[in-house]
Amino acid sequence: MSEDKTKAVKALQGVKGMNDMLPTDAPLWDMFESAARSMLRAYGYQQIRTPIVEHTQLFVRGIGEVTDIVEKEMYSFTDSLNGENLTLRPEGTAAAVRSTIEHNLLYDGPKRLWYIGPMFRHERPQRGRYRQFHQLGAEALGFAGPDVDAEIILMCQRLWDDLGLTNVRLELNSLGQAHERAAHREQLIKYLEGFQDILDEDSKRRLYTNPLRVLDTKNPALQEMAANAPKLIDFLGEESLAHFEGVQRILLANNIPFKINPRLVRGLDYYNLTVFEWITDKLGAQGTIAGGGRYDPLIQQMGGKPAPACGWAMGIERIIELIREENLVPDTQGCDVYMVHQGELANQQAMIAAERLRDAGLDVVLHATPDGKSGSFKSQMKRADASGASFAVIIGDDEIAAGTVQVKQLRGGNVAEGGQQTTVPAEQVVEFIIDAMVDEIEGDDEQ
Ligand code: HAM
């Protein structure tokens, strides 16, 4: 194929690392979202929606100049109409904080906020790592105590329980305060300088800019060096330790197991004190399904009145994949009623009946075809069955003449014995189907 042709074909495919969510995936996303919404409601969180595009400076200042995200992963561009430097959001915290400051949301006290939506990072696509991915995030703004750190962790545990996820573990660390990190950093740089000859390119680059991140290396050759490095936790003062212990005490009291990982540093610069990650071994290398922590300095750093804060975000694609791995996929529910019809008048009546059924709250699919012809009753009934509907409502010339419809139960009840087809006066179809559904539920309850 010529280069031009290859380009043209590529342009008609999705962008690498950015995925379609197909109808077969939708029930899983729905399941996740509805579990998440009810969990968030249970903890008093309110939703916030911010734009997908923000000023590039927001992320540079919020996330930190020497982070992977800001150095090499942001989709940034210049608005050709006014020359502004803009970026597709790589995460949600900076924008939630920006919006909170801009709209003075903390004027009447602390706020618990949540958000959901696409994020963009130009990473090397692989299993569990995408260039467009989706996060659910929660941010507790204006709370200082370790109780809220623990609460945001309990929220995650509740969501895993609600979804039925069991293969997840919690890792915890404290990053202390800036002055404690500075003292540690000095010692750490000295220590790392002793390993100049074995440090890889990434680590050399980070040695003086972000040495904590060197400890986060995945390079097997550097593991021993990282394991023996000076630990930040040994540089924490009394207050930071008390905070960390406070979080741990509440987790233990609530039976949440965790492991303290002194090398857990997170990839964004805004954190202090508590940081945590939820990890699974079921997804290969990209096993972190959620991460977060405290970021007390950020609100002030971004121009707001000083206010403490903490939060987390989870990667929805990774959680969906874990749900699949653990075989927790819900049965896809079909519609309640499929309308089968033949002839123009029957088509009209089917549409009227379908609207009345929908008025009563039922989900109804009308038979329709690519050529606009309805086809035989037999082929329509096949479609009705495949739709997963509980009932088919059938209308043909005979039914039009008699002012009736046929109702056939396709699932549950007596279907095992061949299903029952009943002639019902057209105006009573809604009542008939609802009664049949109630009987079905009551029958189930008696069993
Ligand atoms: P993060 O660790 O960068 O934190 O991202 C949170 C989660 O998003 C990760 O644990 C992972 O599940 C998912 N994730 C990140 N990058 C990708 C990707 N390329 N493909 C698929 N999933 C991905 C934050 O974003 C912070 N804003 C979290 C936070 C909120 N901290 C305080 N409040």
Image (spheres, helix red, strand yellow):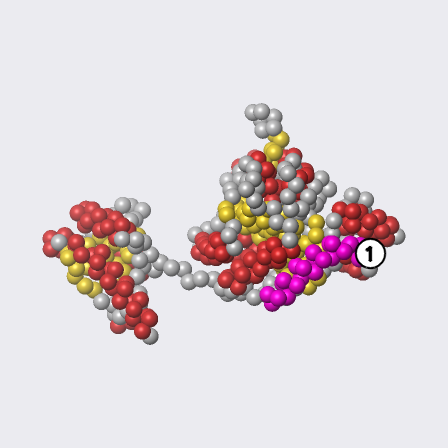
Picture mark count? 1
Residue 393, compared with residue 86, is above or below; it is below
Q: Residue at 53% across / 59% down in the picture? A: 159
- Residue pointed to by mark 1: 230
- Looking at the picture, how far across and down is residue 199, in whole percent? 82, 51
Residue 295: x, y in percent?
66, 47
Q: Residue at x 63, y 62 (%)?
A: 250
Q: Is residue 254 magenta?
A: yes
Front residue (pair 155, 343): 155
Indicate whether 7 appears above or below 254: above
Q: Is residue 18 magenta?
A: no
Tell me the quadrant of the picture where the C terminus can be found: bottom left
Q: Nearer the viewer, residue 115 or 241?
A: 241
Q: Does residue 413 lie above or below 51 as drawn? A: below
* Residue 15, quarter of picture: top right
Looking at this rendering, what residue extends furthest in the front direction? Answer: 108
Residue at the extreme bottom of the image, as rendered:
447
Where is residue 349? Give x, y as percent: 19, 49
- Position of residue 444 in the picture relative to residue 231 (left or right): left
Asked whether mark 1 and ligand 1 are closer than 8 Å, the reply comes as: no
Picture residue at 82% right of the left edge, 56% below the top: 230
Name the outermost residue toward the right.
194
Q: Quadrant of residue 53?
A: top right
- The location of residue 177, given as percent across then percent down, is 74, 49
The magenta segment: 234-255
Identified by mark 1, the residue type is Pro
Secondary structure state at the residue bearing disc 1: loop
Badge 1 density bin: few <14, some 14–19, many ≥20, Cα 10 Å: some
Instruction: Check the image and report above or below for 265 versus 2.
Output: below
Query: Is 147 on the left-hand or right-hand side of 117?
Result: right
